C-alpha cells in the first residue's frame, strides 16, 4: 500500500488535450446551431499542447505513472511535429469538409482523440500504453474514414480498414503476450533489461517478435501488409486520406522505435532481417504498382508504400554483425525520412484538396492536366513536391533518400542500396508523368481554383518547405540525430 | 490425481467440446448457446486460478450482457445460411492446409519445452481474508490509472463513433418532439397579448 502520487508534469500535454476534448463536447452541447467553433477549439488545443510540450521538454529522460509513460526529447520533438501536421491538415480540409457537410463537431472530436492516441503512442514505455494509444488512434481513424456515411465507397474503405486493423491489433497483442511470457514484463525498459541479462528463452521471443513486426508492418502499411492502403486512400474522402497519410506515420515510426529499438534491441539481428525483406518488397511493389494507377489518390498510396519501405531501410542497418556504432546514424536517417515524407504527403494531398470543389473530386490524374495554364504557381508547387518525392536532387526527398542510402552503404549492404535506387528510378516515371500532365497537356477542366486565403498561404508555405528543407537539410537532420542521441 | 486436477480436466474437456461446437454447430442460436457454455466453463477454470472476481465478471458481462445482445442480433437478422455455406467445399482444401500448417508450427514453438509448468508456477495460496476485488481496484486506480483513463477515452470514442455513424435526424415531416425546446419554452413564445381598443356601439 505504499503508493506515491505520480508526477503529472511530464504528461501535462496529454492531460491538456484530453481536457480540451471534453470541453469541446460540452461546448457542442450548448452551442446549438452555431458553426465553426470545432475548428477553433481544436487549433487552440493543438497550440496549447505545443506550448506545454515545448516547455516541459527539458532534455531529460523521465518516466511517470508507474513507468508507463516516458518523456524524452525524441518524444517531444515528434509530438511537436504531429501537432503541426494535424493543424496543417485541419486548415487544408476545412473547405472540403464544409461543402460536403462533413464539418461536424464529431469530426473535430475524433481528430483530437486521434492526436491524443498518437501522443500516447509516442511517449509509451509499456506495451499496454502502446496498445491503448494505437487503439485510440485507429478507432478514431476508422470512424473518420466512414464519416461520409452515405458514400458506399467510403463505407467499404472503412470496413476494410476496420477488419484488417482489428486483425493487425490482434497480431500485435499476441506478439506482446509472447514477449511477456518470455521476459515476464510488459514494461519496455524492463523487457530490455531482461534481454540484456540474457537468460530468456529466445525461441519464444522470436516467435513473439514475428507477430509484433507483423502488427507494426500493418500500421506502417508495408508489403505484405499493405492491402488496405490503396483501398482506404482511394475510398476515404480526400480530407480523411490526407489525415491517414500524414501524422499517423510519425506515430507508427515512434512505435517502431519504442518497440524494436528501446525494447527489443538485443534481437536486432532478427528483426532487421524481417524489416529488410519487407522494405525491399515494399519499394519494389509500391513503385511498380503506382505506374499502373489512373487515380492520383491510389498512385500516392502506392508511392506511400514505397516511401515507408525506404524508411524501414534506415531501421534495418543499425546493428551490423553485433556492432552498434551505426545505430544512431541509421535511426536518425529513418526519422528524417519519416518527417520529410509527412511534409511531402501533406503537400501532395493538399493539392488534391485544392483542386476539389463542391460536387467534384480532383482525384483522377487527368484532373491535373494543364494545371500550369490554370494556375502557374500551384503547378510549380506540385512539380516541386513530385520531384521531391521522386528523389530529384536539392529537394527534401532527395536528402531523405540520400541519408538512408548512406546508412545502408555504411552498413555494407551495397546491393540493397543499388536495388533501392533502381526501383526509385522506375518510380520517378509516375511522378514525372504528373509534371508532364500539368505542363504539356491541354486542360480539360477550366473551373477557377476557389480556395480560401489561409489554405493558399499554408499550401504555398508547405510546398516551399519541401524546397527549403532540401536546400538546408542539415538543421532538421541534426535535430533528428540530437533528439535520438539524448533519448536512446 | 487430486481433486483440483480432476476439476480442471473436467472443465477443460467441456470447454474444448463447447468451443468446437461453437464453430461446427449449424444453427447460429445453438452456436451462441455453446459460446455461453464456453464462457461459463472458462470462468470455472479462472476460479481454480484464484481469480474469482474476473470469473464473476466474465459470467456477468459476457454471459449476461454480451451474449444476450448477440442472441438478439442473431434472431433479429435473418441470416441466410445457404449463402454463407456457399463455396465451403471449394475453400476447404486451402483453408485446411493453411490452418494445419499454422497449428503444427505453433505447437512446435509453444510445446511443453518452452511453456512447461515449471515456467509458470501456480499462484501462492492467499490468506482467507484476501480480496481479489480490492486488490484489482487498488491497482487500477493507482499504478494503472493512466491506461485506465485511456481505456475510458477509447470507450468515449466508441460512443461518439456509434452516434455519428448511425444517428439520423429525419427532417421530412416527422412529428419528433424536442424535450429541451419544450423545457426552455417561455410564456411569451406560446401566448401573445394583443392590445385592442374596446369596441363601442
Image: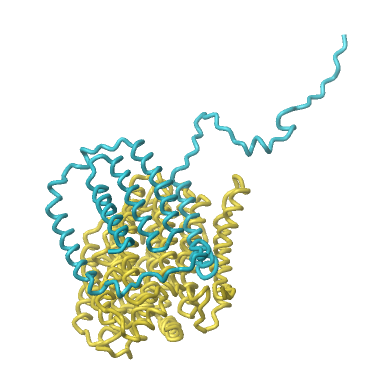
Chain colours: A yellow, B cyan
The x and y percentages for residue A335 are: 38, 77
Front-most of residues A299 and A435? A299
Residue at the outermost top position: B201
- Quadrant where the N terminus of chain A sits is bottom right
Dividing the picture into quadrants, the one containing residue A21 is bottom right
Left or right of B14 on screen, residue B49? right
- Residue A313 visible? The answer is yes
Task: Identify the residue shown where x is 82% and y is 24%.
Answer: B195
Front-most of residues B132 and A320? B132
Residue at the outermost right position: B200
Task: Identify the residue shown where x is 38% and y is 39%.
Answer: B72
Front-most of residues A330 and A390? A330
The x and y percentages for residue A170 are: 33, 61
Number of callouts: 0
Front-most of residues B72 and A306? B72
Left or right of A304 on screen, residue B153? right
Q: Is residue B49 above or below residue A388?
A: above
The x and y percentages for residue A119 are: 47, 69
Residue at the outermost front position: B2
- Residue A332 visible? The answer is no
- Quadrant where the C terminus of chain A sits is bottom left
Q: Is residue B99 above or below residue A332?
A: above
Q: Is residue A470 above or below residue A431?
A: below
The x and y percentages for residue A325 are: 33, 91
Amino acid at each position: 500500500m505504499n503508493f506515491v502520487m505520480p508526477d503529472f508534469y511530464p504528461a501535462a500535454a496529454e492531460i491538456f488535450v484530453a481536457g480540451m476534448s471534453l470541453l469541446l463536447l460540452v461546448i457542442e452541447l450548448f452551442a446549438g446551431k452555431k458553426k465553426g467553433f470545432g475548428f477553433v477549439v481544436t487549433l487552440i488545443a493543438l497550440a496549447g499542447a505545443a506550448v506545454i510540450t515545448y516547455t516541459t521538454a527539458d532534455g531529460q529522460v523521465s518516466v511517470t505513472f508507474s513507468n508507463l509513460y516516458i518523456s524524452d526529447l525524441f518524444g517531444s520533438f515528434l509530438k511537436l511535429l504531429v501537432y503541426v501536421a494535424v493543424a496543417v491538415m485541419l486548415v487544408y480540409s476545412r473547405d472540403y469538409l464544409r461543402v460536403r457537410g462533413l464539418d461536424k463537431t464529431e469530426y473535430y472530436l475524433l481528430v483530437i482523440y486521434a492526436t491524443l492516441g498518437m501522443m500516447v503512442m509516442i511517449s509509451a514505455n509499456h506495451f499496454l500504453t502502446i496498445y491503448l494509444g494505437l487503439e485510440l488512434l485507429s478507432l478514431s481513424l476508422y470512424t473518420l474514414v466512414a464519416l461520409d456515411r452515405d458514400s458506399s465507397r467510403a463505407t467499404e474503405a472503412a470496413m476494410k480498414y476496420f477488419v484488417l486493423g482489428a486483425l493487425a491489433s490482434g497480431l500485435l497483442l499476441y506478439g506482446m503476450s509472447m514477449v511477456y511470457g518470455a521476459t515476464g514484463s510488459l514494461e519496455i525498459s524492463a523487457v530490455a533489461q531482461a534481454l540484456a541479462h540474457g537468460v530468456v528463452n529466445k525461441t519464444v521471443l522470436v516467435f513473439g517478435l514475428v507477430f509484433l513486426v507483423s502488427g507494426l508492418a500493418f500500421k506502417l502499411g508495408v508489403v505484405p501488409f499493405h492491402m488496405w492502403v490503396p483501398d482506404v486512400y482511394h475510398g476515404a474522402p480526400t480530407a480523411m486520406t490526407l489525415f491517414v497519410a500524414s501524422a499517423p506515420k510519425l506515430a507508427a515510426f515512434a512505435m517502431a522505435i519504442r518497440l524494436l529499438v528501446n525494447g527489443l534491441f538485443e534481437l536486432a539481428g532478427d528483426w532487421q532481417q524481417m524489416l529488410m525483406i519487407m522494405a525491399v518488397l515494399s519499394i519494389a511493389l509500391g513503385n511498380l504498382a503506382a505506374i499502373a494507377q489512373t487515380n492520383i489518390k491510389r498512385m500516392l498510396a502506392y508511392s506511400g508504400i514505397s516511401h515507408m519501405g525506404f524508411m524501414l531501410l534506415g531501421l534495418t542497418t543499425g546493428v551490423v554483425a553485433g556492432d552498434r556504432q551505426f545505430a544512431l546514424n541509421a535511426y536518425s536517417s529513418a526519422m528524417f525520412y519519416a518527417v520529410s515524407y509527412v511534409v511531402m504527403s501533406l503537400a501532395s494531398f493538399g493539392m488534391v484538396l485544392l483542386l476539389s470543389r463542391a460536387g467534384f473530386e480532383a482525384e483522377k490524374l487527368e484532373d491535373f492536366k494543364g494545371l500550369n495554364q490554370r494556375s502557374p504557381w500551384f503547378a510549380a508547387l506540385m512539380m516541386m513536391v513530385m520531384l521531391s518525392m521522386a528523389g530529384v536532387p536539392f529537394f527534401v526527398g532527395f536528402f531523405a533518400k540520400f541519408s538512408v542510402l548512406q546508412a545502408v552503404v555504411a552498413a555494407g549492404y551495397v546491393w540493397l542500396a543499388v536495388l533501392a535506387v533502381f526501383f526509385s528510378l522506375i518510380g520517378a516515371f509516375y511522378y514525372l508523368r504528373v509534371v508532364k500532365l500539368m505542363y504539356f497537356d491541354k486542360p480539360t477542366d477550366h473551373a477557377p481554383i476557389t480556395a480560401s486565403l489561409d489554405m493558399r498561404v499554408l499550401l504555398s508555405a508547405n510546398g516551399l518547405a519541401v524546397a527549403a528543407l532540401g536546400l538546408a537539410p542539415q538543421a532538421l537532420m541534426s535535430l533528428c540525430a540530437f533528439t535520438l542521441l539524448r533519448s536512446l | 490425481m487430486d481433486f483440483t486436477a480432476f476439476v480442471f480436466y473436467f472443465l477443460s474437456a467441456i470447454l474444448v467440446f463447447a468451443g468446437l461446437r461453437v464453430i461446427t454447430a449449424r444453427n447460429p442460436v445453438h452456436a451462441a448457446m455453446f459460446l455461453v457454455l464456453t464462457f461459463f466453463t472458462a470462468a470455472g477454470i479462472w476460479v481454480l486460478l484464484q481469480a474469482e472476481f474476473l470469473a464473476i465478471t466474465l459470467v456477468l458481462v459476457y454471459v449476461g450482457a454480451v451474449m444476450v445482445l448477440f442472441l438478439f442480433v442473431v434472431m433479429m437478422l435473418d441470416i441466410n445460411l445457404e449463402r454463407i455455406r456457399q463455396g465451403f467445399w471449394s475453400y476447404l482444401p486451402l483453408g485446411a492446409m493453411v490452418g494445419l500448417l499454422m497449428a503444427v508450427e505453433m505447437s512446435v514453438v509453444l510445446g511443453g519445452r518452452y511453456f512447461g509448468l515449471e515456467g509458470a508456477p501456480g499462484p501462492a495460496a492467499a490468506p482467507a481474508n484476501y480480496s481479489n476485488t480490492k486488490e484489482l481496484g487498488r491497482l487500477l486506480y493507482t499504478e494503472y490509472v493512466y491506461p485506465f483513463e485511456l481505456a475510458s477515452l477509447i470507450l468515449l470514442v466508441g460512443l461518439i463513433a456509434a452516434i455519428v455513424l448511425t444517428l439520423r435526424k429525419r427532417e421530412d415531416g416527422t412529428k419528433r418532439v424536442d424535450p429541451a425546446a419544450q423545457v426552455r419554452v417561455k410564456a411569451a413564445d406560446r401566448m401573445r397579448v394583443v392590445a385592442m381598443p374596446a369596441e363601442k356601439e
